[in-house]
Structure formats: C-alpha cells, structure tokens
Amino acid sequence: MSIFVIAEIGINHNGSLDIAKQLIDAAKEAGADAVKFQKRTLDLVYTREFLDAPRESPWGKTQRAQKEGLEFDAAAFHEIDHYCREKDIEWFASAWDTESQRFLRAFDLKYNKIASAMLVHEPLLRMVAEEGRHTFVSTGMSTLEDLDRAVAIFREAGCPFELMHCVSTYPMEDEDANLNRIGALRARYGCDVGYSGHEVGLAVSYAAAALGITSLERHITLDRAMYGSDQAASVEPPGFRMLVGAVRKIEKAMGDGRLEMNPKEAPIAQKLRAHIPFESESRS
C-alpha cells in the first residue's frame, strides 16, 4: 500500500483564497494525495478574554482580529471544495470544535482528521467516529491513557482510523522525533500508523517513510518567511516535490524482504563466479 501523502495547508493561507489555491496547485504538482485545512469556531475554541487580548497582526491589534483574519468562511470553503474537485485532489480539515465538525459535514469528504490538541476532546472524537469516515488521528501531546481512550472510541464506533505519530513542537528538533514510537504504536494498538512532522528539512520524514508508515503529513507553504506560526515548520513547493519523489523511491526500495537472490543478479553471479569451478579443479 502506497503512503498517503497529505499537504497540510492549515492556516498557512493567511486568510487568502488565492494563496490557498496556489498551495493546492503546489500540492497537486508535487504528487500529494490530499490537502488539509483547519476549521475553528472562534468563540467556542477561545475565551472572550483571550480574543480581546492585544496582538499585532496584519488584520488588527487583537487576538480576535488575528484569528478572524485566518479563518475561512462557508463561501471560501465551498470555493476550496470546487477548486479541489476541479484539480482532482482530495481535501479535508481538522475541526477544533463540534460546531466546526458539523459545518464540515456539508461537504462530501472522504477523510476526517483529529488534531493532536483535540485528542482529549471526547465529544468531538465521538462525533467524528460516528461519521464512519477514515480518520487520521495525530498523537502529539498525548498520554497513553489519552491514546487508549481515543482508540477505544473509534473502535467502539467501528470507524476506520490510523494513528499518526506526532511531536507537537514547532519546529520540532530532530533529536525529539522518537521515530521508534511508530513501531511501538503499531504494536500496542494493532493499527496502521502514519507520521505528521513539524521538523525543518526532510531527513526525518524520509526515515519515517522507511519505517512502514501508511500516511505522511507535512505543512506546506509558499515561503517559510511568511507571516504565521506554522510557516517555519513547513516545506516550500520545491521541497515538497522533493519529499514526495523521495518517498515514492523509498517505497520501491523497501521491497518485500525475501531472502532469495534477486533474479537480476543471476547473470552477474554467473560471470563473476565463472573462475571458481576451474580453480577448484586445479587444486584437486
């Protein structure tokens, strides 16, 4: 099974449909299987005190102005839905509250996503699980008890899912990657496991691809120097093309693990070992 590659646009569009479309184009051209966004109902996700707090941004001087500037409305998501269908690439989104998940139900999406921060939001997990769509569940910031509970919810609902190993630091230091957790998650829960990376560069993602992951998610951006908290942990379009190309090569290179000699080696072996019978005869 081929690794399912997700280009996480998230909020890297900075509230611009034009940027979102450019990122969708870049993901499609790179060979990604899907793009992912985020959806929040601001007054449910944040307190009034937080939203009224000061914050300088391109949209104003409060946290609310910044958050509203980054949040797409229904018309924008309908445009994204139309554009992705036109470009023949899947899209889905991680909801940060139940109202946002209810909003996403208006679209005929194949996938759901549980963000690491939402893994402990049981009403949201149950709402997503009851939809029965294949769900990617990120495991950052989570205890074993959190993971056990989330897996139980999806199993009880009969909802197909896979875990995604994730370390929720932005950007993640390479030494914090703990990629061996991929195998540990697979062994404990007996399910497919992917990798959602926030590191700078591509090496850690390549290593994850060699560990049998079923999905790979990386943030995509037009320019890592753009405004936004996720930009520094994102991959620019040329890097994303390189990432997908290398992952596909790694998939082929992993092979089936059989111990028999590769048939392509047979003529080489015959040529390079041709002298062995003669040398043996000369010594007898």
Image: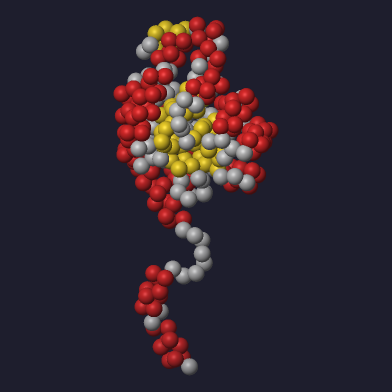
Applied colour scheme: secondary structure
Rendered residue at 39%/83% (across/down): 275
Left/right of residue 99 with respect to residue 79 in the rendered view: right
The answer to whether residue 244 is seen in the rendering is: yes
Query: How many numbered discs?
Result: 0
Q: Residue at x 38, y 11 (%)?
A: 59
Q: Position of residue 79 (x, y in %)?
A: 35, 24
Q: Does residue 57 lie above or below 19 as drawn?
A: above
Q: Quadrant of residue 144?
A: top right
State left or right for residue 104 relative to residue 24: right
**Viewer-proximal residue among 48 and 40:** 40
| Residue 141 shows up from this direction | no
Q: With respect to residue 250, does 150 lie above or below?
A: above
Nearer to me, 186 or 99:
99
Residue 206 x %, y %: 44, 45
Q: Residue 116: x, y in percent?
A: 56, 29
Name the residue located 59 percent from the left edge and 42 percent from the top edge.
181
Q: Residue 167: which quarter of the image?
A: top right
Q: Residue at x 39, y 8 (%)?
A: 60
Instruction: Report the residue that reaches farthest toward the bottom.
Output: 284
Residue 136, horizontal then vertical, whole percent: 53, 36
